[in-house]
Image (tube, rainbow, N blue to C red):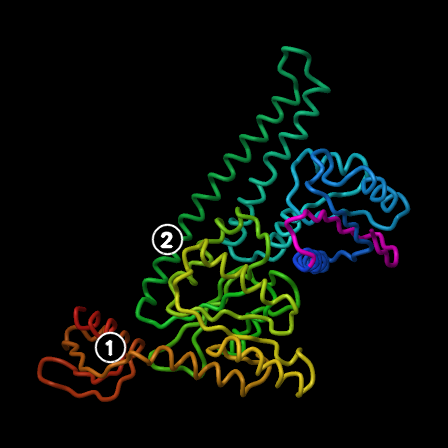
Amino acid sequence: MHDTSTQTSHAAVLVAVQRPDVSDAEFADSLAELRRLAKTLGLAVAATCTQRRASFDPGAYVGSGKLEELTRLVADGTADTILVDHEITPSQARNLEKVTGAVVMDRTAVILEIFHRHAHSRAAKAQVEIVRLQYMAPRLREHGAGRDRQRGGIGAKGAGESGLELDRRKIRDRVAELTAELASLEQERRTQRARRQDVARVALVGYTNAGKSTLMRALTGSEVYVADKLFATLDTTVRALVPETRPRILVSDTVGFIKKLPHGLVASFKSTLAEALEASLLAHVVDASDPGFERQLEVTAEVLGEIGAGEVPRLLVFNKLDRVGDASAQREAIDALRARWPEAIVISAKNPADVARLHARLAAFFTRDVIEAEVRVPWDRQQLRGQVFAACEVVEERAEPDAAVFRVRAHPDTIARLARS
């Protein structure tokens, strides 16, 4: 089946096969997400073609009937791009392109292109390029095989084969170069994180476009990039909670998760997501206005488990309350969410009063184990004063003959470390 809209020279047709093990709701959510991915790429969705099959067609992903339908949609100018809601094989992509004459991008290619456009830091650019090169490598082999058959004779080494080997070597060399660069950058990040070891840390995690960056801006007063697009944030941003607390709390914004995120990207972005691993608390931000938020909760939990952050304490933050409806609908939503998740907080990142409530919850989490104690700083070690004031609430300071003595409120581990310094 397909639905069409106005014709455009930069339009796409969405293609998806529903297998028996996928429910109608899951299938609809996945297609809706692909539609949003297309929008983020700047493509208008002109048509949607779906098919129920026991398995994907090994030759062209869809059956012959749907293949004819796609060919007609491209031939009559309805669309010039085909977006497939699965990761397909290089031969399936090549066959689809050959038959339809359209540009074919599977779900992985779409996500990689979005990541490529939104990467800004050296680390994010390197991470994305590694995964793109790894994605391209088997597709070069597919095209290379065709060139060899055309140019090389039986038992001979054709020009296509030597060209393919050169491409493979270039990709291997470039991946090795980027991997070395990432290792160097990761060492820098570890050094930066080590300097923050006694600072309380909150990582904002959650589905892409759940409003994490808007919330980050509201909590920290920082000018982080905010856009109504998928994967608007790829680089981890770290800022202090404002108004500042004692202990000082750092908030980090992380890359959003998505259903069927390519495993290569999960692995590649582990260093970016290290903020989530090393945080004392994860603020799991959820778009309360999205009908599919429960499945998004599951996806985020799965990815956090994959990166080893499944056991980090978590605060569930239902965001975008302002998009739920009028005041009556919002009250109903709050009651329903709190009934099911009593420890969660329901807010709109655009409401200063809501942000203040979240600020208080974050501060309360980090003061729950705080104790009061004295820290002695010898006069010849006064460089430690900055660490004391950064990691503790200083209640009193007095001078003794051999040291400055601070009465502080802080976590026991922080006090013990300062005492050893």
Residue drawn at x 81%, y 35% is 99
Q: Main secondary structure of the magenta part?
A: loop
Q: Which of 169 and 90 is in front in this view?
A: 90
Disc 2/disc 1 C-alpha distance (Å): 27 Å
What is the x, y in percent for residue 69? 85, 44
Q: Does the magenta stretch include residue 319?
A: no
Q: Mark 1 sits on what residue?
A: 385
Q: What residue type is labelled 2?
A: Gln
Q: Can residue 78 be seen in this view?
A: yes
What is the x, y in percent for residue 86? 66, 47
215 shown above or below 127:
below
Q: Does the magenta stretch include residue 14?
A: yes
Q: Which of 123 and 291 is in front in this view?
A: 291
Q: Is mark 2 on a helix, strand or loop?
A: helix
The number of numbered badges drawn on the structure is 2
Q: Mark 2 sits on what residue?
A: 187
**Mark in front: 2 vs 1:** 2
Residue drawn at x 62%, y 25% is 163
* Image quadrant assignment for residue 329: bottom right
Residue drawn at x 68%, y 55% is 27
Q: Is residue 41 visible?
A: no
Q: What residue type is labelled 1?
A: Arg
Residues drawn in magenta: 1-24
What is the x, y in percent for residue 355? 52, 82
144 shown above or below 75:
above
What is the x, y in percent for residue 369? 29, 78
Q: Is 299 left, or right, of 159 in this rendering?
A: left
Mark 1, other Cα within 10 Å: few <14 / some 14–19 / many ≥20: few
